[in-house]
């Protein structure tokens, strides 16, 4: 059964609301998302089951961002005490006990990429595949940038969704996103243009089966009109 974390929201809905981000890791997704939410007036809590000494890179990226940190083995329970929204970073299993508890309590669960797709007014070119995603994304960005339209790249290429630019993007711009299976598996949107380099067998420790991995990749076209 497909699980999607893609409720209808607008950027204004976060003002004055409590938002928990589950997962910090290296902070590439979490830091940008936290900055966006804080700028929209949300009170943000970042939760991670690891201790601070194992999260140095992620914590460094969060410097200067006004968030509450809840770390350690009991962090998820504390972080789910009273949020209005929960965000899940890529790599967190959709059916993990923490996420299932949030869903059972009817707390809206989202991802950074789902939010970007909802807010972005520019056409999106999405690139996925087991191998060659980053190279292909970079080549597409370079080719499109030779034209007259502004081109923005992001996603799994290392920068996360370009939420910091979403207000400035217009239908005349273009966005190129590298999309991993982790980012695609709970997404209920597809890019206007989808590029698939290849689909081999990968990340079975997360997806469980080859079929589940392929199903996640198929989301890049599953929601096209």
Image: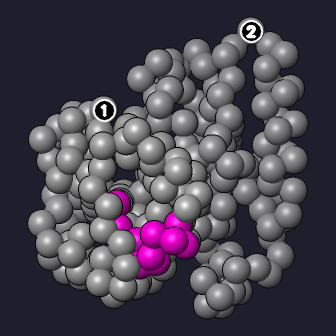
Q: Is residue 173 above or below residue 25?
A: above
Name the residue: 64% across, 67% down. 181
Q: Quadrant of the N terminus?
A: bottom left
Residue 180 percent location from the top left of the image: 66, 61
Q: Is residue 32 visible?
A: yes
* Residue 47 is a magenta residue: yes
Q: Judge left or right: residue 57 versus residue 111.
A: right
Do the numbered discs 2 and 1 sit on residues whose CB atoms are within 8 Å? no
Badge 1, how many Cα within 10 Å: few under 14, some, many 20+? some
Q: Judge left or right: residue 18 versus residue 30.
A: left
Out of 193 and 106, give the one closest to the viewer: 106
Q: What is the secondary structure assignment of the residue under circle 2?
A: loop
Residue 222 percent location from the top left of the image: 56, 60
Q: Which quadrant would residue 141 be assigned to in this image?
A: top right
Magenta residues span: 46-55
Badge 2, how many Cα within 10 Å: few under 14, some, many 20+? few
Q: Is residue 142 above or below residue 126?
A: above
Distance in Å between CA atoms under marks 2 and 1? 31 Å
Q: Is residue 190 visible?
A: no
Residue that numbered label 1 is attached to: 39
Q: Which quadrant would residue 105 be assigned to in this image?
A: bottom left
Question: Residue 126: which numbered mark, if any?
Answer: none
Q: What is the secondary structure assignment of the residue under circle 1?
A: helix
Which circle's residue, 2 or 1, is located before the other in the chain?
1
Q: Which quadrant would residue 13 be assigned to in this image?
A: top left
Name the residue: 24% across, 70% down. 79
Residue that numbered label 2 is attached to: 148
């Amino acid at each position: 059964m497909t699980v999607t974390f893609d409720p209808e929201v607008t950027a204004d809905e976060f003002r004055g609301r409590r938002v928990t981000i589950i997962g910090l890791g290296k902070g590439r997704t979490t830091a940008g998302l936290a900055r966006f939410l804080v700028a929209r007036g949300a009170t943000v809590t970042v939760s991670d089951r690891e201790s601070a000494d194992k999260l140095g890179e992620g914590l460094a990226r969060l410097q200067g961002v006004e968030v509450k940190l809840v770390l350690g083995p009991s962090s998820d329970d504390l972080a789910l005490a009273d949020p209005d929204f929960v965000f899940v970073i890529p790599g967190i299993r959709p059916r993990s006990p923490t996420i299932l508890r949030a869903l059972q309590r009817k707390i809206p669960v989202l991802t950074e990429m789902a939010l970007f797709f909802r807010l972005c007014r520019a056409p999106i070119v999405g690139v996925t595949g087991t191998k060659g995603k980053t190279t292909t994304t970079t080549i597409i960005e370079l080719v499109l940038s030779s034209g007259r339209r502004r081109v923005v790249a992001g996603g799994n290429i290392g920068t996360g969704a370009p939420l910091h630019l979403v207000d400035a993007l217009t239908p005349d711009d273009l966005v190129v996103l590298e999309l991993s299976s982790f980012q695609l598996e709970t997404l209920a949107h597809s890019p206007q243009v989808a590029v698939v380099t290849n689909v081999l067998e990968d990340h079975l420790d997360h997806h469980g089966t080859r079929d589940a991995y392929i199903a996640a990749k198929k989301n890049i076209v599953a929601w096209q009109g």
